[in-house]
Image (spheres, coloured by chain):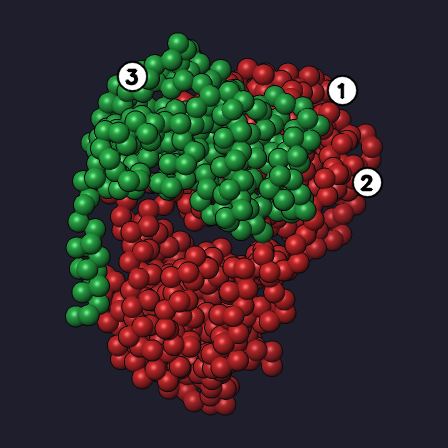
Amino acid sequence: MKNNHTIVEIRNLVKYYGNHQVLHGINLDISPGQIIGYIGPNGAGKSTTVKILCGLIQEFQGEVTIFGKNLRNQALDIKKQVGYIPENAVLYEALTPLEFMEFVGEMRGLGVEQTREKGTALMNIFEMKPNLDQRISTFSKGMRQKVLICSALLHNPDLIFMDEPLSGLDANSVIMVKEMLIHLAREGKTVFYSSHLMDVVEKISDRIILIDQGKVIADGSFEELNKLSNDENLEKMFTRLTGNTNHEEKAEAFINAFEK
Amino acid sequence: MVRFILLLFRPFRWLIDNMGADYTQFIRILQLKLTLDDRRTKGFLKNSQNAQGKMLIRQSFGQILMGSFFGIVLILIKSQFTFYYFSHTFIMAMMAMMIISEFTTILFDTTENVIIQPLPIKGNTVSLARNAHIFIYLTLMAFNLSLLSIIIAIYKFGLLSGVIFIVTLFLNVLFTLFLANVLYLGIMRLASGEKLKNLLMYFQIFIAIFFMAAYQFGLKLVDKSHIQDMVLPVHWFTYLIPPAFFSGFTEGFATLNFDLPHLLFIGEALVVPVLCFYLSGKYLTPVFNRKLMDLEQGDRSSKVKIESSKSSLWYQLILPFFVFNASERASFKMMWKMTGRERLFKQTLLPSFGYIVIMVMVPFVSNPQSFGELAQGNKYLIFLYILILVAATLPRALQIGANQQAAWIFKTLPINSPADFFKGTIKAAFAKFFIPFYLGIAIVVCAIWGIKVLPDVIIALLAIYLGTLLMYFFDNLNFPFSLEKTAVQGGAAAFRIFGLMIPAVAAGYLHKYLLNFNHANLILIPTYLGAIVYVNRIIVYKRVTWRQVDQSNNF
């Protein structure tokens, strides 16, 4: 798997919340120009990993190097080249998307005019140009998600972290984001995509990392993983590897609960 | 505790059912609300494990203490009617304040709608449960506040009188609650959506200022030298003053005096609360739920406003005085816009402007002939330095708002130190809200004392600006608009104000002292300017670090 130059290097990443251990020593090397699908069941530690890599959580054990820089003491330089799209994050509701993006852009050191042009162009792709000067408080869930995506891409980052970026988006936007991701990867950008939507991950990822209970339990392209096990799709493999095989029984028990 | 409170409602089952609510559902909703309150940890106690439940006891203790201060004054009053009149007025005013500051949030809480609305809940149940919830808290407060008054009443006027006083306290709570209901629901009929939200905000600001004014002028009108023999004369309009109903009621029963005036009061005390209750239940509550949905959807359903991207002339004018680097300008610009739009911020800040205007006006109105004398002395320093009380509300007001989780964005940006952001924030709020107000006062001051006091006006402004900066940077470093409103209130605020008064008074006296020497006051201009530069360039970067900021915020 290891390329001649890695851009993200994770060594023995461990994270505790109080006494509860969330990550049990994650080791990963990520090469540029790839879309990495980071999947796992609820509570597996997906969001925690992403938040550590983006600098939102600063307390962790182990070593993380991004662009050859140490996350612990060079986080600022790393953040300059990284974009983060969280899941359904709270935005400053009283602002308009343009004002919000202007702020983000200026904090990143982009000029006002440049930010405004870029932001308008990005929003236009999502057909949100008419909403540029309306307050975010009037927006639906999907519209907010689009604002988040646009403001994360303003500074043309080389590495993009996404935490369920498609949540709340309509079918057209989902297709568009998928296309956008493939396009970004082709330009040499790296996308770290955390999700539990198997079908999307299966279709766009160059490499799939499956984690469960804070450990990597499978790693490779879908074809590679498939060779090992002959699962017909990612969903089946996911089910088998995370040890939940009795879905039918459970569904039946669910139905029975009503009939009593 | 919750169970006990709920048990108290059982005898009134028939009433609740009769009002078009379902008793079982009513009790369940109430239980949910009370349980949530019981477990709610206030913002600043978020990390402490044993915060549970203690808040209520601490709050009760504060209320009892406060009520005792008031009760001690009453001990001298001989007339039973006057005694109860003052007690009820006090309780009513305190309840009104409470309703304005806290219960509007509860009354218009839309967060639970998602859970409650889809359930098959009968007609008025939800709004009745809301009111019962508020009623429980108001009753608790009324009793805490009048604990000492009740004891004094029993001692002075006998047990019977004291017991009837307790009964009238209940009536008073009911009356105040449903009067507030009638007012709020009346307003809700007037408008909808975004407009309604703004209207409610201005209504609250108005009421807050109105009570402050009534209290201030009321104190001025009472002749305190004859407090022992003070008897409130009963004019025709006394029959229109609500606290008089309840004091007449108590006196009537306690002395078994049922002449016409007392019968009138007794009638009013019984009929008016019931009438308000009936009115709000019959005509207003049915609209309530519909309007509440409106409020929630408000931002979306009402016509979407297009924000202009142009900045105002005032912004252009003031910017060069405050902002000297790029990232500070970005936050200055953002906060300039947000402070103009955040309702909770305005709701917290604007009343303080009103309070100050009233406090400054009261001496003029009660003693108009001193106007000429005033222009001779240098009392204008008081007018200028008192404004630090307004500026002092800025740091706290900036922290309150509904953007509890929005600060994550700062963690993903490559910002070396959060100091520039915090600097831009306080500067924007100061420039946008305080400076225009100060200019207004300054013009009045210059009109009375002449243009020669202009240097003093500038000195006071610099002193207040310096004080505001220090207060903001040395408070908890919460990101703007990220604290729940309830978390910031309480006794701590009063201590802060007292702590603030000492340096403010010291600065004022230093200024006054220097006025004795020719132009010696001018030395304060470079002194304060230097201090401001020092704070903005050096101190802020040492104090506002990520380490400090991380302690107060969740990401």
Question: Tag on residue B447?
Answer: 2
Instruction: Give the chain ID for the red colour.
Output: B
Q: Amino acid at mark 3?
A: Arg
Drawn side of residue B510 relative to residue A10, left or right: right
- Observer-side mark, 1 or 2, equals 2
- Residue located at (63% from left, 23% from top): A110
Q: Helix, strand, or loop for circle 3?
A: strand
- Residue located at (37% from left, 31% from top): A37
Q: Is residue B521 above or below residue B62?
A: above
Give residue B509's position: percent from left, percent from top: 61, 28
The span from disc 1 to disc 2 (Cα, nearest Å) is 22 Å
Q: Is residue A85 above or below residue B531?
A: below
Instruction: Judge by depth and name the residue closer to the eye, B197 or B387.
Output: B197
What residue is shown with label 3?
A11
The span from disc 1 to disc 3 (Cα, nearest Å) is 72 Å
Q: Amino acid at mark 1?
A: Asn
Q: Is residue B505 above or below residue A5?
A: below
